[in-house]
């Protein structure tokens, strides 16, 4: 197994090489139009002060600028050909949670160059959501109904131009978390050290140049004092291309 110091060095080198070729590269430059999705049914959200640690390892997947209350309220954009999208939003302190299915109009599925806009107008907790700053709100979008959510994550954003994807992790007691792409890039994830960390406590920042277009498999590894806690395999979809 690669030692943590070796992982850290290799991760920095890999990121540096990728960043050299990323200047001016917009992952969604080919998109032309935006199609507004429709909420399926009523808007579901909860607020609770007493929360416990539970749920999945992967809590959020989005462009870094999309992980805040103002970004969610402005409407998130996703390039996808899915007929339905499940959007889960969870605050880092665990107080706020919402999960809703959105329907994509049929005309969108005939236009592979379009974005899908997920409106957040159904919330009755606008002021609370607005107060969550950068990194304080996890966003997770998956194709299909919320009841059938799998391990493929659609990368949500609040604008077309971004250079990295953040994966928010609930480490469940791990002392080290790192990611690895199918192409061999490997780097440590950063721990949140301030504020409540009930829902997630690590952030993995992956350059879009390491993901490209279409789908990319990413592995999340966790360790507790050097002891492996198991690997989680996820699929990130940065565009509507297969």
Image (cartoon, rainbow, N blue to C red):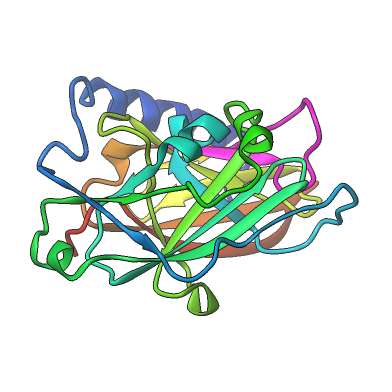
The residue located at (49%, 57%) in the rendering is 219
The residue located at (62%, 56%) in the rendering is 98
Q: Is residue 68 visible?
A: no
For residue 138, side relative to residue 64 (left or right): right
The residue located at (66%, 63%) in the rendering is 56
Q: On screen, 157 above or below 82?
A: above
Q: Residue 31 occupies which quadrant of the picture?
A: top left
Of residue 28 and residue 177, the one placed in the foreground of this image is: 28
For residue 94, side relative to residue 90 (left or right): right
The residue located at (32%, 30%) in the rendering is 162
Q: Is residue 159 visible?
A: yes
Q: Position of residue 152 (x, y in %)?
A: 41, 65
Assess whether residue 22 is covered by the magenta stretch: no
Q: Position of residue 173 (x, y in %)?
A: 81, 51
The quadrant in which the C terminus is found is bottom left
Q: Residue 129 occupies which quadrant of the picture?
A: top right
Question: Which residue range is magenta in the image?
Answer: 188-206
Q: On screen, 4 above or below 146?
A: above
The furthest residue to the bottom = 148
Q: Position of residue 90 (x, y in %)?
A: 64, 49
Q: Position of residue 238 (x, y in %)?
A: 29, 50
The furthest residue to the right = 50
For residue 3, side relative to residue 47 (left or right): left
Assess whether residue 204 is covered by the magenta stretch: yes
Of residue 205 and residue 98, the one placed in the foreground of this image is: 98
For residue 166, side relative to residue 134 (left or right): left
């Amino acid at each position: 197994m690669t030692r943590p110091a070796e992982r850290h060095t290799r991760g920095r080198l890999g990121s540096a090489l990728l960043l050299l070729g990323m200047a001016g590269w917009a992952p969604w430059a080919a998109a032309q139009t935006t199609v507004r999705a429709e909420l399926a049914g009523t808007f579901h959200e909860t607020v609770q002060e007493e929360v416990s640690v539970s749920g999945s390892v992967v809590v959020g997947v989005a462009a870094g600028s999309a992980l805040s209350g103002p970004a969610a309220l402005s409407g998130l954009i996703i390039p996808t050909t899915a007929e339905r999208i499940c959007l889960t939003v969870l605050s880092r302190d665990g107080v706020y949670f919402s999960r809703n299915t959105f329907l994509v109009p049929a005309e969108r599925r005939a236009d592979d160059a379009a974005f899908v806009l997920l409106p957040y107008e159904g919330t009755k907790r606008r002021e609370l959501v607005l107060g969550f700053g950068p990194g304080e709100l996890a966003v997770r979008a998956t194709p299909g109904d919320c009841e059938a959510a799998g391990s493929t994550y659609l990368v949500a954003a609040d604008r077309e131009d971004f250079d990295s994807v953040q994966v928010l992790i609930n480490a469940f007691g791990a002392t080290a978390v790192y990611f690895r792409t199918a192409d061999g890039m490997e780097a440590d994830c950063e721990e949140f050290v301030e504020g409540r960390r009930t829902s997630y406590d690590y952030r993995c920042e992956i350059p879009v140049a390491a993901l490209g277009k279409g789908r990319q498999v990413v592995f999340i590894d966790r360790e507790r004092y050097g002891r492996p806690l198991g690997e989680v395999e996820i699929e990130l979809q940065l565009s509507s291309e297969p």
